[in-house]
Image (cartoon, rainbow, N blue to C red):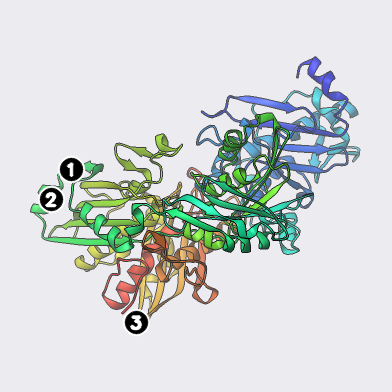
Amino acid sequence: MERRDFLKTTSLVSSAFVIGFYLPTKSRAAETTVAKPLEPNAFVEIKSDNTINFIIGQVEMGQGTYTTLAMCIAEELNVNWEEINFKGAQVAPVYNHFYGPLMITGGSSSIVAKQLEMRKIGSALNTMLKEAASKKWNVRVYDIKTKDSKVINKKTKEDFTFGELIADLPSIKVPKDPKIKHLKDCTIIGKPHSRHPKEAWAKVTGKADFGLDTRVDDLKYAAVLHPTVFGAKVKSFDASALEKKTGIIKVKQIPSGIAVIADSWYLAKEALNDINVDWDLGDFAKISTADMDKEYAAAMEKEGASMRKDGNSAEAFNEASKVIELDYDFPFLAHAAMEPLSFAAHHKDGKATLWSSAQSQTLTFGATLKVLGVKAENITYNTPYLGGAFGRRGAINLDFILDGLHVAKDEGFPVLTLWTREDDIKLGNYRPKYKNKVKLALDEHGDITAFDAKVASQSIFKGSPFEGFGFKDGVDGAQKEGLASHPYNIDNNDMQAHVMESPIPVLWWRSVGHTQSAQTVECSIDQAAAYAKKDPIEYRKSMLSNERFITLLDDVALKANWKNRKKEKNVGYGVAIVESFGSICAQIAKVRVSKNDFKVEKVWCSIDCGFAFNPQNVENQMISSINFGIATLLSSEITIKDGATVQNNFYDYTVTRISDAPDIEVSIINSGEKIGGIGEPGTPPILAAVPNAIFDATGKLYTSMPIKIG
C-alpha cells in the first residue's frame, strides 16, 4: 500500500478494515485491493468490535449461496462461524462473474465461480492478521495461530481479537498468491452444514428482509394494470373514477401499462378495477396454443439450422434393421416462485436508492442509469433475500424492474411496485415451448447407429444482451445443450433447430435447455434398450466411455437395488443420467400407475459435482430440483387462448404439493474432477426417469408434457 493512501485511511481505520482480493478473469483485471474503510466494494469487513461481515456479490434466493461462500472464507480465516454477518454488495467490477463484465447469480455457478476466490481471501487475511500480531508481540509468525476470530500466541497464550488489529492491517502487504488448504484437509468445507444460523433464524422469525418487506420512511405502493394479450399496447385510458378516492396519490402511464400509486398496495391494486383502458390488441389476439402446435409441427417437416452433423446418418438409416421415431411436446412453463415480483426505488435530486430482487445487479443498475438518468455514483443498491427465483428474477427484458423504475421516476418519494402472482404467471418470461422430433437407427443387435433430431422453440438469447453468448448460426444455446452434446458413443448424428417467433417473452427456467433435451435423449435411449431387450442401465453403459457416468450409474443402481427390484403390477422403474452445469446426475424413479394417474413413490439420486463443498446443501438442492421437476410431469403448463395466458395462480398453474413429493435418497460422489454446479442438475434426470418408469409399468411412453394417463 502506498504511504499516502495509508495516511489517508488511518484516521478511519479504527472503525473498520475492508479487504478485496480477486482472481483475474476476462471480465476483471488482476488486482488486489485494500479498500478505504467503510467502502463496501470488497469481500470481508472487520470492525473494531470484532464484528466480521462477509460482503457478497451473489444473491441468496434459497440456494444456499451465502452459507457455502461463507464456509469457504471461514475455512481459511478461522472466524467464529456463528457470529459472522452477511452484507449485500454494491454494484462494482470486483464482484463481476466469469460470464462477463456483470454481477449475476444463475446457471448454478456461484460456488464454481467464487469458491477459490473466497478461500484465497480468507487465507490472505489470515496471514495478514498473524503478521500484524507478530510485530506487536515481536515473535515469529510460526509461533502464532488463529481461531474463532482471534489471533493467539502459541507460547504465551496471549491473544488479540481480529478487531483489535485492524489499525495495523493497512501497513501489511497483501499476499499475492496466498496458500489454501487441500480440500481433504478442510474442517468446514466438505462437511454438512445447515444454513448459517443468522440467515436461518432471520427467516424462521420473520426478521429477514425480502423484497416485499421493503419499508422506509414515506414509502408508497404501486400496482400496474397490464394487458393480458401478448404484444398489446395502450391506445387510451380513463382513470377519472379515481380522482376523489382517498389514498390514491397518482395514476400514470408507463411503457407496460397503467400504474396507480397509493398509500397502500391494496388500495393501488383495487384501483386498477376503476380504470378503463382501450387496448390495441394486435394480431396475436387471434392465436391460441393449437395454432402454435400446427406452426411447430410444420417446422418439423423442414430443414433447420445445423446443431450437430457428423458421420453419415442417411446411410445408417438405409442400412438400419429398426428405425424408432418419437415426437416430444413440452409446453411453456412459468417459474411460479413463492414470493411475487417486486421492485422499490426512490428517485430524488439526481439520486436513486434501489431495493432490488433481481438476479443481475449490473443489468438493473444499467436500466436505472437509462430510465432515471442518474449518475452511477449516485445510485445506492440494496439486495434483499429473494423468495425463490428459478431464473425468473433474472429476466433479460427486466420487466418488473422497468415497471418499478418508471413508476418511481421523478416522484420524490420511495415507491414499492408489486406484481400480483397473476401478473407473473400471465405476463410471460416462460420456459419456451418446445417440439422435438427424434429418429434412431438400430442395427441387428439393437445398437444405435444414428441419432437424428429436430428442435423447434423460441430463442431465449436472440435479441438479448446475451445474444453473443447464446445464439449462433440460427441456433439458440438452450436448443442444443444436452442434445447435441449427449454423452453416448453414436457414430452418426444429424441435429437441427428451428427458431420460432412470437411476442411471448421467454427465459431460462431451472436447468434451461436440459429441461427438453434430457427427456429427448434419455427416453429415446430407453426405447432403443427396450427394442434390443437389454437392461436400460447396461445398455447405456455399453455406449459410454466417460467413467464418471458409469460410476454414477453403478452407484444409483446399487442404492436402488436395481438388479433385484421387486416386480409389482402397475409399478415401474426408470433410469436417466444427465450432465448439466458441470455436474453429472443419475436417477432412478419408482412410479405407481393407476387408471388415470401416477405417483412417484421413490427416487434414488447419485450426484457428482466434483466436490461437495456443503454436502447437506447438495442433498437439499437435489431434493428441491427433483420435486420442482415432478410438477412439470404431473400438471404444470402454460396454455394460450386468443393471445392470452389461460392460467392465473397456483389454483390452475399447479406446482408440486407435499402429497406429490416422493421419498428421495441422495448419494454424493466426490470424484475430484472439476467443480460443477448444484442448483439445477437435479431437475433434468427426473424429467426422463419418470416417463421411463411409466413405460416400464405400462408399456407406453408418454412424450407430451404434462403426462395425462388414460
Residues at circles 1 and 2 in contact by the CB criterion of under 8 Å: yes
On residue 311, the disc is 1
The answer to whether residue 539 is visible is no
Q: Is residue 37 above or below residue 447?
A: above
Is 240 on the left or on the right of 595, as rendered? right
Residue 255 in percent (x, y) is at: 52, 45
Q: Which residue is mark 2?
A: 316
Quadrant of residue 247 in the image?
bottom right
Mark 1: amino acid: Gly
Q: Name the side, left or right, on which 111 lies relative to 221.
A: left
Residue lying furthest left in this view? 318
Find residue 653 and report its horizontal and vertical position in percent: 47, 68
Residue 103 is tagged as none
Q: Nearer the viewer, residue 349 or 554?
A: 349
Q: How far apart are the two marked residues, 2 and 3, measured between alpha carbons?
A: 37 Å
Density class for disc 1 (Cα within 10 Å; few <14, some 14-19, many ≥20) is some
Residue 521 higher or lower than 254, as above or below: below
